Amino acid sequence: MKIVKATLVHIHQLVDLFDAYRVWYRMAPDKKTATEFLGNRIKNSESEVFLALTEEGKAVGFTQLYPLFSSTRMKRLWLLNDLFVAPEFRGQGISKLLIGRAKELAYDTNAAGISLETEKSNHIGNQLYPRAGFELDDHNFYFWANERME
């Protein structure tokens, strides 16, 4: 298994995984908009996307991180927003490899750390993240929904 930084060359393989990820989170499939969304993130350097590729070059997992900044730490943070491995490739340590690459990004950019959130019902993720060195914090997480969105 090889972990690579995704570029526009990988967009079609990435979109297939991204769409499956969104469906897992109960969103409607939408590969057309996903292609545009991911293409813009990559073209505009607005996120870092890493792909897990088999020896044959098939994309089987990905993670996407967005840059944030901490005022109190006066440093960059990374938000690990997306992590997904195709169901037929789970249980092979691919998530750990992707998280390892995300940690390398944090080291390389001298970031204070990586933040992530997952649903309480995500039993696999809630077991994986502590094993990967993440600590569950005691902060309240709030969200405001823009009701004027499309």
Image (cartoon, grey):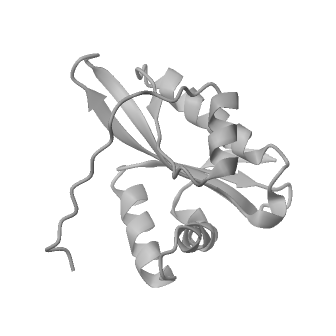
The residue under the point 54% across, 49% down is: 120
Residue 58 visible within the image:
no
93 up-or-down from 25: above or below? above
Closer to the camera, 72 or 58?
Answer: 72
- 135 to the left or right of 47: right
The residue under the point 38% across, 58% down is: 41
Closer to the camera, 20 or 4?
Answer: 20
Task: Report which quarter residue 19 is drawn in.
Answer: bottom right
147 up-or-down from 125: above or below? below
55 up-or-down from 107: above or below? below
Residue 86 visible within the image:
yes
Residue 28 rendering spot, x and y as whole percentages:
48, 82
Task: Report which quarter residue 15 is drawn in.
Answer: bottom right
Residue 109 rendering spot, x and y as whole percentages:
44, 25
The residue under the point 52% across, 31% down is: 105
The residue furthest top is: 73
Task: State the count of labels.
Answer: 0
Residue 111 rendering spot, x and y as whole percentages:
41, 23
The C terminus lies in which quarter of the figure? bottom left
Residue 122 rendering spot, x and y as whole percentages:
61, 53
Closer to the camera, 138 or 42?
Answer: 138
The residue under the point 23% across, 17% down is: 72
118 up-or-down from 146: above or below? above
The residue furthest left is: 148
